[in-house]
Image (cartoon, rainbow, N blue to C red):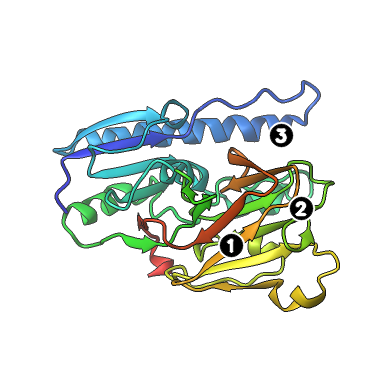
Amino acid sequence: MILKRLLLLLKPLSVSSPPSHINPQILQFLENRRKVHHDAINFCQAILQKKSIEWKAVHRNNLSQPINDVDLVVTVGGDGTLLQASHLMDDKIPVLGVNSDPTQIDEVEEFGSEFDAHRSTGHLCAATVENFEQVLDSILEGQIVPSELTRIMMSVNGLDLSTYALNDILIAHPCPASVSRFSFRSSGLRVSTATGSTAAMQSAGGFPMPILSQDLQYMLREPISLGATSNYMHGLIKRNQTIVATWTCRKGVIYIDGSHVNYTFKDGDIIAISSKAPVLKVLLPHKFL
């Protein structure tokens, strides 16, 4: 792979201030997480300084425009940082995730009864500080190539939304206690890619899919009086299919890969969902290959 320009996209270092009465062990744990992440950033930058590559580092919160004019994006953080990068990427530039703060099993076992000691999952991250240089060299030498992950395309009244979902979308009323009304009533409609099928979709009763599958999985949340539509509560949207639904509430929201990216719509709007979005090229961990 010809690699001349690289963008290093960083998860912010800041950690919200915990209450003063918090368990000292939790305070120590949070401070250690901040330090480990900081050290990982410095390590990755030191490795890049040794390579014949033009690169720049940007904090993810400072990036709002589409990513272009680079040959590779390297995210340092976890899956959230890679997801945020994906919303600004097309199908031309590959992305490599570096898990800056992997979960330590011994910590989880030691503190599991006192607090959640999980760190970063890094499900899609192919590198850590332990192997970042090795993985980077393999990319430069063409020994590993990116995989193409399916994303979700959405349109409202025939107009495509500018953001594609890598994990999943949720279409629902903005108030979680309100009913979401299409041609059926429920608390919302969730659609996931194969990449996102092991996250909220599986927790809701869905099934994991092979990560390179081009199908989408959908599920009605808490359906009400399904009647004739009961056979369509959960299923697949095949590669060449589009699901279309008319919204019949005053307000509605499409949440994309969580709550931070969302689009609002209104009564009578027609929403179309398919897997026709540009793929995302990701250097995946060996476990997927």
- Say few, some or many: other residues with alpha carbon within 10 Å of mark 1 (under 14 / 14 to 19 / 20 or more): some
CA separation in Å, label 3 and label 2: 43 Å
Q: Quadrant of residue 8?
A: top left
Q: Please state which amino acid type lies under the numbered disc 3.
A: Gln
- Secondary structure of the residue carrying tag 2 is strand
Q: Which badge, 2 or 1, is on the more N-terminal residue?
A: 2
- Residue 141 is left or right of residue 148, and the answer is left
Camera-nearest residue between 255 and 143: 255
User: Mark 2 highlights which residue?
Assistant: 180
Residue at left 76%, top 53%? Answer: 180
CA separation in Å, label 1 and label 3: 50 Å
- Say few, some or many: other residues with alpha carbon within 10 Å of mark 2 (under 14 / 14 to 19 / 20 or more): many
Q: Which badge, 1 or 3, is on the more N-terminal residue?
A: 3
- Say few, some or many: other residues with alpha carbon within 10 Å of mark 3 (under 14 / 14 to 19 / 20 or more): few
User: Mark 3 highlights which residue?
Assistant: 25
Task: Give residue 288's position: percent from left, percent from top.
Answer: 42, 68
Q: Kindly indicate whether the residue at mark 3 contacts the one at mark 1 (C-beta within 8 angstroms).
A: no
Task: Give residue 146's position: percent from left, percent from top.
Answer: 30, 59
Residue at left 25%, top 38%? Answer: 6
Could you tell me which quadrant the C terminus lies in? bottom left
Could you tell me which quadrant the N terminus lies in? bottom left
Q: Kindly indicate whether the residue at mark 1 contacts the one at mark 2 (C-beta within 8 angstroms).
A: no
- The dot on residue 244 is 1
